[in-house]
Amino acid sequence: MKKSVAIVTGASQGIGRATAIRLAKDFSGVVLAARDGRALEETAGEVKANGADPLKAALDLRSKESAETLVKQTLDRFGRIDALVNIAGAVPQIDLFEMTDAQWQDGLELKFHGARRLTILAWDALKASQGSVVLMSGSAALDPKPGFAAVAAINAAIIAMAKAFAEQGIKDGVQVNSVVPGPVMTHRRQTFMEKWAPAHGMTVEEATKKFPAEVGISRVTILQSGPQLMSQEDPDVAEEMQRILRGEGIQILLAAETLNVQGRSGEGVSLTVRASSREQTIEGSDLLIAAGRIPNTAGIGLEEAGVKLDGHGYIRVNERLETTTPGVWALGECAGSPQFTHASADDFRIIRDNLAGGERSTRDRLVPYCLFSDPSLAHVGLSEREAQRLGVGVRVAKLPMSAVLRTEATEETQGFMKALVGASDERILGFTMIGSEAGEVMAAVQTAMLAELPYGRLRDAVLAHPTMAEGLCALFSNVAPGPAQ
């Protein structure tokens, strides 16, 4: 990699964070500027993991002194500036007629004047390296919506300013562009668009233009009250999904306590949140709350039929799915079965066969699940956490998806496979995968588990090339030898 340095403002979250992480693959040094220095720590770690040397600069670029400090720190550390990406600055999502002078001035000072000053201060270094400048605008400049007039006005000014800088750039050899981001068009979103567009009667090009207005996604923040995202998963699984989401520009706050909510979802909301021992305000257009589910069994006459509930409100059933009232059966989520469609469908088959004189039950059935994110998550059997809780000895094997040859063709290298094998035998006890086609690969392992095949049968199988399932051979080759081997 040749020596090259990029400055990214607003690098602590959202598009700024995603941009910095991506540029780390192409630049030897990435300067991360944001007001919140603590939030830069995680971005710096991702930049370093991608191969670049990070420089953190906790500065408020509304002042000229801060902009001068940023340029000086960059030149002192790296001696050059090859790219400047101006993303910092969020204009309050308030209607032009309701915005106060202070709010208007604050938005101008950071997003417009701050970018102008920093570009001018860095210009000589950019000229010396024949570098480039990106001034980030926003989709509201092109398609103003009710309540976003102030945002549209300032973003339109940024586009005009970029054109003025570009005129000088032609003379000085500095490339200047203004970017209207909308959603960050990552590989995952491109893949989604290729599926979404035909289903809605559009080409990918048409959908790319229509998608922001149609779906309205530009920035997402996840607030997790617990210390781990996806608390039921193993820590390495949760951390990998978290890394993938953050790489998409999604902000994730763990152990977050919501102190106050104002506004109306769909029109504009403001949340006061405490996370990492500090309070912050998060603004957005929509608020989605995952509050869990409870069985809808109260007040429907079950007690009159003698059907009893458990302490959580689920219908009490035995392994055959018989309730406490003879001749009355219950299936699905109301009976406490795993909350998946395929589990409810199996409940139906059990009751159907038992009504015909069979002896089927839910005992020891192997129920898998898939999270249809992109890349997807699939799991069947025991997790490491469950094995530890149950006192089951296991050998753990892992394989990064980048080691699966199929991903060299599809470029879907994120994620990993993980298998649990008995510590003293060859049973496959569990399987987890984050990656493309995870559900299909998991089904192959589940079939082997149902057939009680030893893991060596999959390790030594001749699987078609190049497929995602082919990675199972390499995965199970990573199982450590057991005591009898």
Image (spheres, rainbow, N blue to C red):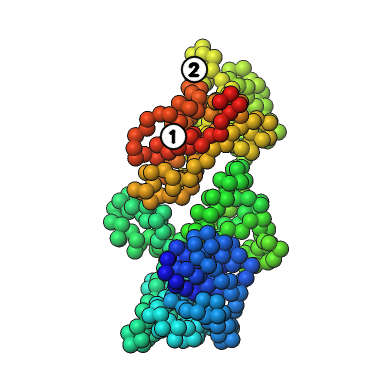
Q: Nearer the viewer, mark 1 or mark 2?
A: 1
| Residue at image point 44% right, 48% down | 402
| Residue at image point 59% right, 67% down | 40
> How far is mark 1 from mark 2, CA to CA?
37 Å
Q: Which mark is residue 473?
A: 1
152, 95: nearer the viewer = 152
Callout 1–callout 2 Cβ contact below 8 Å: no
| Residue at image point 61% right, 26% down | 483
Q: Look at the numbered disc 2 and give the secondary structure of its residue.
A: helix
201, 16: nearer the viewer = 16
Q: Amino acid at mark 1?
A: Cys
Residue 229 screen position, x and y as percent: 60, 50
- Classify 177 as above or below 387: below
Residue 465 screen position, x and y as percent: 34, 37
The quarter holding residue 332 reads top right
- Classify 337 as above or below 196: above
Question: Can residue 225 be seen in this snapshot?
Answer: yes
410 left or right of 155 in image: left
Q: Look at the numbered disc 1 and give the secondary structure of its residue.
A: helix
Residue 55 screen position, x and y as percent: 56, 71
The residue that label 2 is drawn on is 353
278, 309: nearer the viewer = 278
264, 305: nearer the viewer = 264
Q: Which mark is residue 149?
A: none
Quadrant (top left/top right/bottom left/bottom right) for the N terminus: bottom left
241 left or right of 144 in image: right
Quadrant (top left/top right/bottom left/bottom right) for the C terminus: top right
